[in-house]
């Protein structure tokens, strides 16, 4: 039965590989539409959290209804950027975390005390990031992502020494990041420094399968191109599914919002990686090699 499935996959890659391009193209257009819509509404492709935008983070060791508290604060400060979430230990809510920009720390604390009562100094911690410092953090974070992306592109090109196959692999990684960003916007999340780290991790996760595919297709000579591609799929999908299961378990096991954000970005990036590696990259590689063979035959004649 396994041989029958492998034979079907080989046949599909050999004869209908161009049809595979429809799915990644639609997914790419979807990602661009979401990001473009978000930019038109907010002026940003992705919304920044307090750590990258600047503002106040108030951690309170006092249980409170986060829905009521958020509604109260939004009424008091209608024009601020606000996020209220629970602070949990061992699955039990022990307090709240309030993140807000465009409001002074003392004013925010006074408003919270008005709602939940006066707090002792040992019941809360207050962290403030200035707007200029937050902007500097964001610029440095974006620069880190760009540098990482450029370096991985150079490494891929240096290894394969072929522009188009290298471009297909690197663009697949870029498309994975775009889709993860689009889902980030759709779920109304705000990017933190942990989220930036997740995008850096996603570059490494994504390029693995693309290099695996491109290496086996270009470097090996046994069998046909379709056979080499088909033999790569089980290994590549095993790698990706193993990572996805780990990410999913970590997402539900952790109580840290920062770790949840990392796992969220990796999860959607890995889903996109399956599509862009095994349909976009694989199809274009097949097309590239087919045209190369045609040119070789033409020059030989």
Image (cartoon, rainbow, N blue to C red):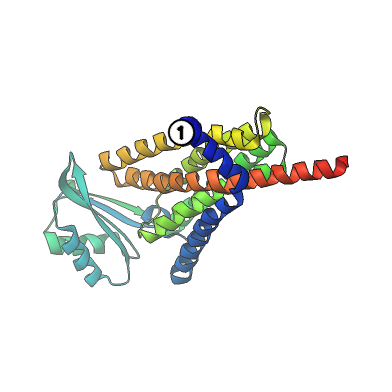
Q: Which residue is found at the position 53% from the left and 53% from the top?
A: 24
- Figure quadrant of the C terminus: top right
Nearer to us in this view, 126 or 243: 243
Whole-percent x, y for residue 8 in the image: 52, 39
Q: Which residue is found at the position 20% from the left and 67% from the top?
A: 71
Dot 1, how many residues are within 10 Å of its Cα: few (below 14), some (14-19), or many (20+)?
some
Residue 148 visible in rendering = no
The relative height of residue 181 versus residue 252 in the rendered view (above or below) is below
Residue 95 visible in rendering = yes
Q: Which residue is found at the position 61% from the left and 38% from the top?
A: 226
Residue sticking out furthest to the right? 301
The relative height of residue 24 versus residue 238 in the rendered view (above or below) is below
| Relative horizontal placement of residue 245, taking residue 23 as reference (left or right) | left
Tell me the residue that label 1 is attached to.
239
Q: Which residue is found at the position 12% from the left and 57% from the top?
A: 118
The relative height of residue 129 versus residue 77 in the rendered view (above or below) is above
Nearer to us in this view, 115 or 18: 18
């Amino acid at each position: 039965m396994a041989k029958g499935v492998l034979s079907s996959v080989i046949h599909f890659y050999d004869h209908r590989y161009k049809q595979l391009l429809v799915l990644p193209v639609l997914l790419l257009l979807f990602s661009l539409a979401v990001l473009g819509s978000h930019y038109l509404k907010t002026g940003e492709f992705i919304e920044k959290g307090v750590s990258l935008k600047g503002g106040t983070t108030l951690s309170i060791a006092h249980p409170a209804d986060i829905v009521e508290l958020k509604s109260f604060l939004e009424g008091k400060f209608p024009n601020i950027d606000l996020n209220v979430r629970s602070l949990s230990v061992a699955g039990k809510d022990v307090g709240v975390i309030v993140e807000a920009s465009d409001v002074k720390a003392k004013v925010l604390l006074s408003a919270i005390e008005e709602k939940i009562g006066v707090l002792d100094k040992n019941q809360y911690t207050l962290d403030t990031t200035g707007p200029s410092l937050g902007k500097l953090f964001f610029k440095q974070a974006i620069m880190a992502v760009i540098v990482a992306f450029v370096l991985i592109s150079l490494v891929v090109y240096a290894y394969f020494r072929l522009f188009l196959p290298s471009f297909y692999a690197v663009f697949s990684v870029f498309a994975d990041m775009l889709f993860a960003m689009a889902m980030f916007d759709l779920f109304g999340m705000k990017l933190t420094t942990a989220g930036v780290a997740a995008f850096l991790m996603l570059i490494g996760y994504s390029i693995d399968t693309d290099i695996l595919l491109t290496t086996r297709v270009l470097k090996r000579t046994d069998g046909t191109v379709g056979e080499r591609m088909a033999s790569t799929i089980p290994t590549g999908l095993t790698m990706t599914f193993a990572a996805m299961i780990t990410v999913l378990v970590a997402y539900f096991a952790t109580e840290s919002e920062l770790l949840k954000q990392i796992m969220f970005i990796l999860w959607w990036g890995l889903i996109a990686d399956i599509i862009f590696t095994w349909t976009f990259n694989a199809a274009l590689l097949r097309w590239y090699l087919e045209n190369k063979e045609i040119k070789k035959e033409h020059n030989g004649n």
